[in-house]
Structure formats: structure tokens, C-alpha cells
Amino acid sequence: MTGTAFSVWPAPLRAELPVRPPRAVSVAFTGLVVALLCGVGEALTYVATKLDGPNADVGSLAGGLAVRGVIYLAVLAVAIRMTHGARWARIVLTIGIGVVGLISLIIEPAAATLSAKEIGDLFDNLSLSAVLTGIFRTGHVLAVLIAIPAMYHPAARRYFRAAARSSS
């Protein structure tokens, strides 16, 4: 529906920006998608573990999944806008994913590490779900640590500046 009143992207962005964003923006987008997929994997691991327990609250788990789903879809929408040169999207992703999101992912493992008397205590009662959660969380953190700097690569900065000039 381009060129109509229902067009999703502003006309100047469609007309004057390169067809494809620079590699740095593509790397950032890929990193964000990988982070989202790791978040989905971690959420599903959590739900599967809770459902396996005797007192699973299905309504609460479904509600939690719904909230996460909405958040993940919103992040994906903002990431897509970022690939089209929206500077505001880059800022939102930097603050939301690069700061708040990373802190939320790191705080629990950091607290567990700091509270352990010995390093071996961290591996007591290790379960498959804990290992999967650790893998997903590590992938999530690494993907974000790749995506955020990529959005500020010189080629990406030029792309966002060009997008800002073409929309004004």
C-alpha cells in the first residue's frame, strides 16, 4: 500500500534512502532478532519447567507469556523502524534493550555469583532447565552486546543522518 493514505513508511524515507541499509544496521537488526529469539527460548523453558511442577498456575503463566509476547513484538517493530533509518528507534533500542534489558538479564546471575561462598556452589543442583536458561541468557546478552554498538558504527551513523535529512 505504498503511496496511499495507509502507507506505513513516510514517502521521503522510501524515495531517498538506499534500498538496503548498511551492513552495520543489518548486523544490529540480526543481533536484536537473535536476542528476541533467545528471550522466547528462555520464556518457553521457564513455562515448561513450571508446567512440569505440581502446582502450575496456567493462567499466570499464560498471562506472563502474553505480556512477553507483546513486548517482544513491540521491540521487533521498533527494530524494523530502525532498519529504515528512524533515529528515535535507535535511541529507544539503546535505552530499552542496551541498558534496561541488559541490567535485567545480568542482575540475577550476578547476585547468585556474589552470594555463593564457593564457585562449586553455583553448580549444585544444576538442572537441564537451568543450563538451557543459561545458554539462552548468554546468547541474549551477547546478541545485544553486538547489536547496540553496530547501531553506532560510522556507516550506521551516516545512514541515520541521511534518513533524518530526507524526512525533514
Image (cartoon, rainbow, N blue to C red):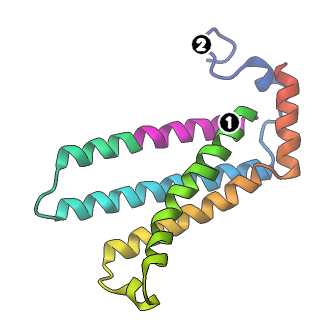
Where does the magenta region start and end? 69-86
Q: Which mark is residue 6?
A: 2
Q: How busy is the neighbourhood of tag 2: few (under 14 within 10 Å), some, or many (20 plus)? A: few
In the rendered image, the residue lying farthest to the top is 5
Residue 131 drawn at (x, y percent): 39, 76
Residue receiving disc 1 = 89
- Residue flagged by tag 2: what amino acid is it? Phe
Determine whether 130 is above or below 81 in the image: below
Residue 35 drawn at (x, y percent): 55, 56
Q: How busy is the neighbourhood of tag 1: few (under 14 within 10 Å), some, or many (20 plus)? A: some
Determine whether 76 is above or below 10 in the image: below
Residue 150 drawn at (x, y percent): 76, 54
In the rendered image, the residue lying farthest to the left is 54
- SS class of the residue under badge 1? helix
Q: Of tags 2 and 1, which is closer to the observer?
A: 1
Rounded to the nearest whole Å, what is the CA distance between mark 2 and mark 1?
Answer: 21 Å
Q: Which mark is residue 138?
A: none
In this rendered view, identify the residue nearer to me: 158 or 138: 138
